[in-house]
């Protein structure tokens, strides 16, 4: 059986810039997938390969661990999508996970590429304005290990509950199915070897 094809970060960045801009002058590239799959790392790597790119983390706009995705999407529409679509600067309120409340407002001038990364970024509500939807996945034990390494073992119960929460959202939105590109990120070295492209 032949090996699966691989894409480098530069390859993925080229796909992003070749897609048409549908959010004003901005190309909206959404990076979705389960927690711990490597979405944040991919978005950071893509930003480094792109000119005039900004990253918006879904973690910054969730309302805590029990976030209502529909409510998040509505705030994104009002605070980010509508202003950028009109060629204006967006302004969204960042959630403070330690304080348990929304805090500072963040201004976002219209970028050439907006990398929206996190669970829920692949919502069908964004389909009309999205240029590219990338799905990233990894084995469950790899993802849990990454979560513990990042947030500490004390957060593991909340992490496991979140994994169930996101699974429902991904099934409801059929995110993996609708993705333009499906990648695997638990290889030994995704930076040198590239991301495995999934069917």
Image (cartoon, helix red, strand yellow):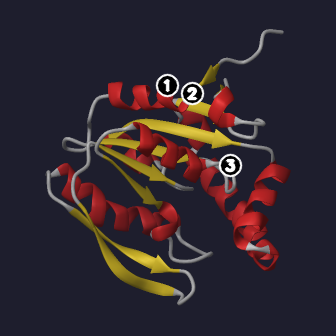
Task: Find residue 25 and report its image quarter.
Answer: top left
Mark 3 nearby-residue class (10 Å; few <14, some 14–19, many ≥20): many
Residue 180 horizontal/vertical position (percent): 50, 30
Mark 3 secondary-structure assignment: loop
Q: Position of residue 163 (x, y in %)?
A: 72, 61
For marks 3 and 1, give the one nearer the viewer. Answer: 1
Q: Is residue 14 depicted above or below 31 in this figure?
A: above
Q: Which residue is mark 2?
A: 8
- For this orientation, the residue located farthest to the top is 1
Q: Which residue is mark 3?
A: 37
Given residues 150 and 4, the one toward you in this image is 150
Q: Are marks 3 and 1 in contact (CB under 8 Å)?
A: no
Residue 122 at least partly seen: no
Name the residue carrying label 1.
11
Quick one: quadrant of the C terminus? top right
Q: Name the residue rendered at 76%, 35% in the picture.
A: 187
CB atoms of marks 3 and 2 within 8 Å: no
Q: Which mark is residue 154?
A: none
The vertical placement of 70 against 197, above or below, is below
Front of the two marks 3 and 2 = 2
Q: Total of numbered circles in the picture?
A: 3
- Residue 154 lies, with reference to residue 33, above or below; the image says below
Spatial CA distance of label 1 from label 2 is 5 Å
Helix, strand or loop at label 1? It is helix
């Amino acid at each position: 059986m032949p090996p699966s094809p691989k894409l480098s970060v530069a390859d993925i960045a080229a796909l992003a810039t070749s897609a048409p801009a549908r959010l004003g002058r901005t190309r909206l590239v959404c990076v979705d997938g389960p927690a711990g799959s490597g979405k944040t790392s991919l978005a950071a790597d893509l930003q480094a390969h792109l000119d005039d790119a900004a990253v918006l983390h879904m973690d910054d706009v969730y309302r805590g661990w029990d976030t209502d995705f529909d409510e998040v999407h509505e705030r994104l529409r009002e605070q980010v999508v509508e202003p950028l679509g009109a060629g204006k600067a967006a302004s969204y309120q960042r959630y403070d996970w330690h304080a348990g409340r929304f805090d500072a407002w963040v201004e976002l001038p219209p970028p050439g590429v907006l990398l929206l990364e996190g669970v829920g970024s692949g919502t069908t509500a964004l389909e009309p304005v999205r240029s590219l939807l990338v799905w990233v996945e990894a084995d469950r034990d790899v993802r849990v290990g990454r979560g513990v390494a990042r947030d500490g073992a004390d957060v593991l119960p909340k992490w496991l509950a979140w994994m169930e929460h996101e699974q429902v959202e991904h099934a409801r939105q059929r995110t993996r199915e609708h993705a333009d590109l499906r990648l695997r990120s638990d290889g030994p070295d995704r930076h040198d070897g590239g991301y495995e492209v999934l069917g």
